[in-house]
Image (cartoon, grey):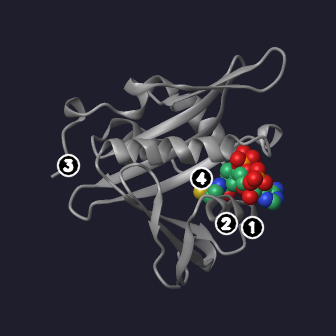
Amino acid sequence: MLKTQTEYKTFGERESTYLRTSMTNIMKIRLATPEDLEGMMRIEDLCFGDERFDSETVRAYLARKDAFAVVAVTNEGIVGSAMGTASARLRCGRIGSVAVLRDHRGMGLGNKLLEACEMEFRARGITHFLLEVAVENVDAIKLYEANGYRINDVIGGYYSRGKDAYLMEKDVTMEGRRVRIRPS
Ligand SMILES: CC(C)(COP(=O)(O)OP(=O)(O)OC[C@H]1O[C@@H](n2cnc3c(N)ncnc32)[C@H](O)[C@@H]1OP(=O)(O)O)[C@@H](O)C(=O)NCCC(=O)NCCS
């Protein structure tokens, strides 16, 4: 059974990840708090347009015990975010989104945000991860494939305007090593 929030060390309690992005900007990856809502909504607007989560959805990721969000922060504010839900019943973690502001892409932040989500899942005892991604979202598919996710299904009309999604999945050991890829 999934432990309650207070029974395990979450990603945020254990450590934050710091990255140096330039001579002046120190980047930190940490668990998001309700105070981050505005900054996260800015990421939604700028990265997803029509497909963005509304504020109620993001608020739910921040508030629910079976959900969490991580943010990448510089001295300019939030420049990237990722969200996940952890299903105790299915013992699986679902990545809801990963997004990085355009000016900060290609520097490894997407990788770090995804890694932070996986750390949080593992802290909750979850070793099966899945996500949906639009079939034409080449950058994101490459990010996920580079991190060991494999396409296992196509979900027709998953997004608004009938766009299809790939279901991508990954299994790891508790130590974080990849152990099994389901056949596609
Ligand atoms: C997908 C996204 C999060 C990647 O963020 P990022 O910070 O640029 O990713 P990284 O720099 O960590 O790159 C990670 C890997 O992804 C792949 N990748 C990312 N951008 C790529 C690009 N433009 N071209 C080719 N490969 C790319 C590469 O495999 C890369 O690995 P490498 O650094 O070893 O080459 C970013 O493009 C984004 O925010 N897109 C809009 C929001 C979105 O569609 N999110 C995903 C759906 S939820």
- Would residue 113 appear left or right of 104 to someone viewing this image? left
Residue drawn at x 56%, y 33% is: 71
Q: Which residue is mark 3?
A: 2
In this rendering, which labeled residue sits more in front, label 1 or label 3?
A: 3
Q: What number of labels is visible?
A: 4
Q: Which residue is mark 2?
A: 141
Q: Amino acid at mark 4?
A: Arg
- CA distance for labels 2 and 4: 18 Å
Instruction: Using the image as rendered, state which of residue 8 and residue 5 is in the foreground.
Output: 8
- CA distance for labels 2 and 3: 29 Å
Q: Amino acid at mark 1?
A: Val
Q: Amino acid at mark 2?
A: Ile
- CA distance for labels 1 and 3: 34 Å
Report whether residue 47 is seen. no
Check if mark 2's residue and mark 4's residue have beta carbons within 8 Å: no
Mark 4 or mark 3: which comes first in sequence? 3
Check if mark 2's residue and mark 1's residue have beta carbons within 8 Å: yes
Q: Residue furthest left?
A: 1
Residue drawn at x 40%, y 48% is: 175
| Callout 2: SS | helix
Q: Residues within 10 Å of mark 2 (few under 14, many from 20)?
A: many
Q: Which residue is mark 4?
A: 52
| Callout 3: SS | loop
Q: Which residue is mark 1?
A: 138
Check if mark 2's residue and mark 3's residue have beta carbons within 8 Å: no
Q: Establish if 19 lies above or below 153.
A: above
